[in-house]
Amino acid sequence: MTASSGAELELVAVSKTFGAVLAVDDVSLTVASGEFLTLLGPSGSGKTTTLMMIAGFESATAGEILLGGRRLTHVPSYRRNLGMVFQHYALFPHMTVYDNLAFPLRTRGVTRAETDRRVEEALARVRLPGYGARFPAQLSGGQQQRVALARALVYGPPVLLMDEPLGALDKKLREQMQLEIKHIQRELRLTVIYVTHDQEEALTMSDRVAVMQGGRIEQVGGPAELYDRPVSRFVADFLGESNFLEAVAVAAEGGERWRCRAAGGLEFSGIAASPLEAGRPVTAAIRPEKLVQAEDAGAAALGAGANGCKGLVEEVIYVGDATRYRVGLGADGVVTAKVTNRAGARPADAGSAIALAWSPEDTRIFPGSSA
């Protein structure tokens, strides 16, 4: 299992239908050599079907799949030489850990001595040295997932495919495994395509994330780009948490910045995610942590052009590092503010008046209304 650069993988106008159902719709995507890319989306978005077509477990109805420039579209799965890790491990229960790892090497004609070396190296890499004689039933869920990862790595594939591999683990172990997988990927310079519906997991592990909805890719970008500059309401809503204000575009203020007015008269400025037209309905998205109490020191840093609103605190929820305020804005709706707890901060009480401020740069405006 020598460390070598992964291969570039390319999807060109790939589609998949199951009868009358269009599961994947004209997906084109290039995954660079050594890149960790996550397919993120809700159930039914097409992410797992896309991964299964790359693996060769499903055939593409249309389009091409290329690995390092070589067409894979009609190559059977067992000849694609891709690593695969499933959510439920898929270990052979009647085989020892050693035999589970040795199996893909034996099918490739690797000698016994080389097999022993690679299995030992793979187990050491996933921090399970000396576990070769155990059976899967003698391992914890986390240990079984490490064995499944080692088996996928043991023959040195250029691309590793992972289908929600941490979904069966508890939160603490899942977070630990996220960092370990990322460390191994960087060390081996593997190309990884990872499927999950967990937004935090995608942000933590990925170089880029492809957000999918209805069989199509909604947006592709780095974690910070997707979180701070979503191109649609769906991405803003699915990736993290957002407040949404229904409004009307009033006037352009220069560049991509627009002035908007909500139903109750609240005016604010923000950055248009796509071209807008004055007088047309829009939806503005603001992350809860971008809202600050106007009297706090942090509000002064927003400058004279900051957005602001006043409302009544409807609910206060203490979550440890922060306090969440649910604030009613009358006819303008309801927003949630997430305020960091720190020494000297003055918390607001339920039923009290509160003034909030936020930056226009932290306000994304999308054409159309969800109403």
Image (tube, rainbow, N blue to C red):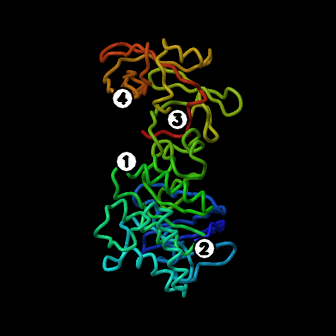
Instruction: Give percent across and percent down for residue 237.
Output: 46, 42
Distance from Cα at disc 1 to Cα at disc 2: 40 Å
- Residue at point 66% right, 63% down? 33
- Residue at point 36% right, 29% down? 320
- For the residue marked with disc 4, what is the amino acid? Gly
Q: Earlier in the sequence, mark 4 or mark 3?
A: 3
Q: Earlier in the sequence, mark 2 or mark 3?
A: 2
Distance from Cα at disc 4 to Cα at disc 2: 49 Å
Q: Give SS at disc 4.
A: loop
Residue that numbered label 3 is attached to: 281
Q: Earlier in the sequence, mark 4 or mark 1?
A: 1
Q: Which mark is residue 63?
A: 2
- For the residue marked with disc 1, what is the amino acid? Lys
Q: Earlier in the sequence, mark 4 or mark 2?
A: 2
Location of residue 126 with respect to 112 vertically, above or below: above
Question: Answer yes or no: do the residues labelled 1 and 2 have beta carbons within 8 Å?
Answer: no
Residue that numbered label 1 is attached to: 172
